[in-house]
Amino acid sequence: VIFPALDIRVKNVARAYSLEHKGETDLFDHLFEVLNSNLHDDDHFRRELAGCTSAIQTSLTQHMSKEEEQ
């Protein structure tokens, strides 16, 4: 409902937003995989967790900036 209305206002924005939302879903899925892993006392776990949260923060910040510009 929202994406077709956006496409009327800004050409091809619906496809870009759909791809961004899919990417963000994938990032959260990976974060949950890391959190559910058995590596909580491992340095690899901490690096993986830091990487996931950093990627999510970057993605959401960029996404929200784009949406606010529109």
Image (spheres, rainbow, N blue to C red):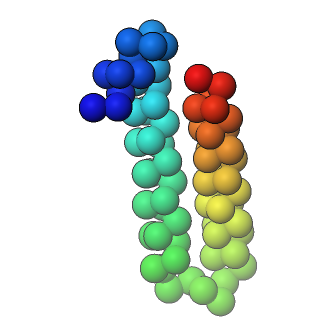
Is the residue 15 above or below the residue 54 in the image?
above
Across and down, in percent, residue 63 comes to 60, 38
Residue at image position (62%, 60%) is: 52
Is 68 located above or below residue 61 in the figure? above
54 relative to 33 in the view: left or right: right
Q: Where residue 46 sits in the image (x, y, percent)?
A: 69, 75
Determine the image quadrant of residue 70: top right
Whether residue 36 is visible to the viewer of this picture, yes or no, is yes
Can you give x and y, in whole percent of width and height, for residue 33 in the image?
A: 45, 70
Q: Which residue appears at 61% of the width and 54% of the height?
A: 56
Check the picture and name the quadrant holding the N terminus: top left
- 58 and 2: which one is in front? 2
Q: Is residue 64 above or below residue 46?
A: above
Residue 15 visible in the current orientation:
no
Task: Tell me which corner region of the image, top left, top right, bottom left or bottom right, holds residue 51.
Answer: bottom right
Q: Residue at x 46, y 20 (%)?
A: 13
Q: Which of the two residues, 11 or 52, is positioned nearer the viewer here?
A: 11
Q: Nearer the viewer, residue 42 or 64?
A: 64
How far from the left and from the top, in percent, is residue 65?
67, 35
